[in-house]
Image (cartoon, rainbow, N blue to C red):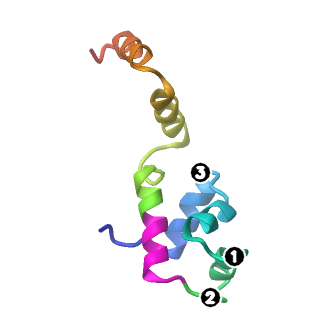
């Protein structure tokens, strides 16, 4: 289990990467506006909810890559095996 990210870390990474609070809210199954309430200090999140958000952000590597790097990774993952191999050969990784 990953150490939960803080509220500031989650909100900052989400903002930097264009992740909408409403999307994160859907991930945790929160009532409409729950994360806005959390952001404004009106409610707290459970350990389970923080774990879901932390895992999503860490799995997507939003905290580790720049926006351009993240776009490259996502585009690479959408390629079929032949396209991936061709790209890797072009940049001398194969």
**How would you rate the neighbour count of disc 2 (Cα within 10 Å): few for under 14, some for 14-19, many for 20 or more?**
few
Q: Which residues are magenta?
A: 45-54
Q: Are marks 1 and 3 in contact (CB under 8 Å)?
A: no
**How would you rate the neighbour count of disc 3 (Cα within 10 Å): few for under 14, some for 14-19, many for 20 or more?**
some
| Residue under label 1 | 36
Q: CA distance from mark 1 to mark 2?
A: 9 Å
Quarter of the view holding residue 19: bottom right
Which residue lies at the image location 47% right of the left edge and 58% below the top edge? 57
| Residue under label 3 | 17
Q: Taking 41 as reference, is 69 left or right? A: left
**How would you rate the neighbour count of disc 1 (Cα within 10 Å): few for under 14, some for 14-19, many for 20 or more?**
some
Q: CA distance from mark 2 to mark 3?
A: 24 Å
Precedes in sequence: disc 1 or disc 2 = 1
Report the mark closest to the observer, 2 or 3. Answer: 2
Q: Taking 5 as reference, is 89 left or right? A: left
Q: Are marks 1 and 2 in contact (CB under 8 Å)?
A: no
**Residue 84 locus on image (x, y percent):** 40, 19
Precedes in sequence: disc 1 or disc 3 = 3
Quarter of the view holding residue 58: bottom left
Which residue lies at the image location 72% right of the left edge and 76% below the top edge? 33
| Residue under label 2 | 43
Quarter of the view holding residue 8: bottom right
Residue lying at the far front in this picture: please name it: 29
């Amino acid at each position: 289990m990953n150490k939960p990210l803080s509220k500031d870390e989650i909100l900052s990474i989400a903002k930097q990467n264009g992740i909408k609070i409403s999307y994160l809210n859907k991930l945790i199954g929160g009532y409409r506006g729950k994360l806005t309430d959390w952001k404004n200090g009106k409610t707290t999140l459970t350990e389970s909810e923080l774990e879901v958000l932390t895992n999503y952000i860490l799995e997507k590597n939003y905290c580790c890559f720049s926006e351009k790097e993240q776009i490259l990774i996502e585009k690479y993952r959408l390629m079929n095996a032949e396209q991936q191999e061709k790209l890797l050969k072009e940049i001398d990784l194969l």
